[in-house]
Amino acid sequence: MLGVEVTVADIDLTGDDCVVAICVRDGFRQAIPVLELPLPAPAPDGAEWIAAYRHWLG
């Protein structure tokens, strides 16, 4: 969310089949397309699923 660290509280699928991360910080929630979500280094557990999704979209 604009360059600040957030917690991904959930993953959801939108009506147009876009996978989004539901990000939370200080009581605010925002859905961000998972492919636009910058990941920290080292990548967290589960990041391989984002890589697989990116590869599948090709």
Image (cartoon, rainbow, N blue to C red):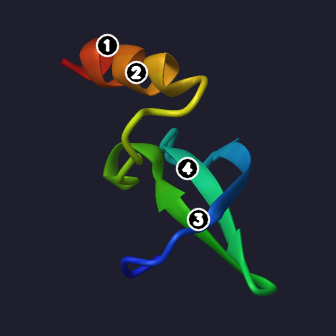
Residue farthest right in this picture: 27
Question: What residue is at 50 percent from the left and 19 percent from the top?
Answer: 49
Question: What residue is at 44 percent from the left and 33 percent from the top?
Answer: 43
Lower position in the chain sequence, tag 4 or tag 1: 4
Residue marked by disc 3: 31
Disc 4 to disc 3, C-alpha distance? 6 Å
Residue farthest front in this picture: 42
Residue marked by disc 4: 20
For the residue labelled by badge 2, is the local secondary structure a helix, a strand or a loop?
helix
Lower position in the chain sequence, tag 4 or tag 3: 4
Q: Which mark is residue 56?
A: 1
Question: What residue is at 46 percent from the left and 17 percent from the top?
Answer: 48
Residue marked by disc 2: 53
Q: Marks 1 and 2: CB-CB under 8 Å?
A: yes
Disc 1 to disc 2, C-alpha distance? 5 Å
- Residue 18 located left or right of residue 24: left
- Residue 6 located left or right of residue 58: right
Q: Position of residue 11 (x, y in %)?
A: 68, 43
